[in-house]
Image (tube, grey):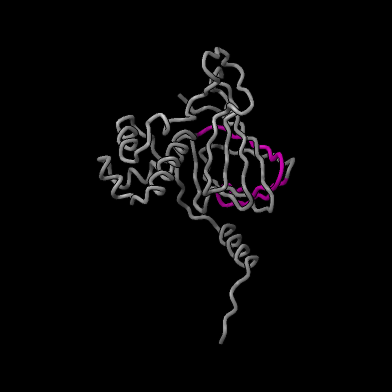
């Protein structure tokens, strides 16, 4: 019997069905947005150099498990490990930590305002997610504001994740958003808003043919 290859539409439908299936009970904790950004830079650089995870971990004197968690944003990077990664990946330390602090330009004393184009950016290219931290550095940290631009079919992945305990409120500016909160799926459109506790396992994606933009207001990490 001859089997015809699946069309791209069929493949997309299969991916959608798999994504919309009941999620696994386990969830990963994302340590912080900055850790996620740093981990992505490490992983992209390692892959660009064609280096296996084991080789880089051995060169840095850390376990493969720890390096894998660092690349996924699940663990913070110590200064010693960051310096070792900088050396192993032949990447200046200042390049690795770029965008982890606001840079308003040399001699700029203003901390209550961040100009357009100067916000911290986190680009998760392989996930199709681009984030900007909109909170000015003078903020006390009670609330952080983010904007996420999600490419068509971009997503956080099949695994559930959670962050720290605290309220998170989102507003869909444009496009579509599929939001899994624990075992419930919400299909959101432009103009819809949502909320959840940051400690609640979740995942999300853009199922549409155009970009999705979402604003998130997140209460600060408890000190």
Q: Is residue 183 magenta?
A: yes
Across and down, in percent, residue 98 comes to 46, 30
Q: Does the magenta stretch include residue 194?
A: no
Q: Residue at x 62, y 41 (%)?
A: 149
Q: Which residue is drawn at 60% across and 22% down?
A: 114
Above-or-below relation of 87 to 28:
above
Across and down, in percent, residue 5 comes to 58, 75
Above-or-below relation of 21 to 30:
below
Q: In the picture provided, is 71 more to the left or to the right than 196? A: left
Mostly what secondary structure, the magenta segment? strand
Across and down, in percent, residue 218 comes to 58, 31
Q: Which residue is drawn at 57% across and 57% down?
A: 19
Across and down, in percent, residue 34 comes to 47, 33
Image quarter hosting the C terminus: top left
Q: Which residue lies furthest to the bottom in this view?
A: 1
Depth order, front residue of 4/69: 4
Image quarter hosting the N terminus: bottom right
Depth order, front residue of 111/139: 111
Query: What is the magenta range?
Result: 165-189
Depth order, front residue of 95/211: 95
Q: Which residue is drawn at 57% across and 52% down?
A: 183
């Amino acid at each position: 019997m001859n089997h015809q290859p699946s069309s791209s539409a069929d493949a997309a439908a299969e991916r959608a069905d798999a994504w919309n299936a009941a999620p696994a009970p386990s969830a990963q904790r994302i340590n912080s947005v900055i850790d996620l950004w740093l981990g992505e830079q490490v992983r992209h650089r390692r892959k660009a150099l064609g280096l296996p995870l084991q080789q880089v971990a051995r060169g840095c004197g850390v376990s493969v498990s720890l390096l894998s968690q660092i690349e996924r944003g699940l663990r913070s990077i110590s200064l010693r490990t960051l310096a070792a990664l900088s050396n192993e990946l032949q990447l200046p330390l200042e390049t690795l930590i770029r965008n982890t602090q606001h840079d308003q330009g040399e001699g700029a004393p203003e901390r209550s305002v961040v100009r357009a184009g100067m916000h911290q950016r986190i680009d998760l290219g392989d996930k199709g997610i681009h984030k900007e931290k909109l909170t000015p550095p003078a903020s006390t940290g009670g609330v952080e504001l983010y904007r996420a631009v999600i490419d068509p079919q971009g997503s956080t992945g099949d695994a559930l994740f959670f962050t720290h305990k605290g309220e998170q409120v989102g507003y869909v500016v444009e496009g579509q958003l599929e939001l899994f909160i624990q075992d419930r799926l919400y299909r959101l459109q432009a103009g819809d808003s949502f909320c959840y506790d940051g400690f609640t396992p979740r995942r999300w994606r853009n199922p549409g043919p155009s970009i999705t933009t979402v604003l998130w207001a997140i209460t600060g990490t408890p000190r």
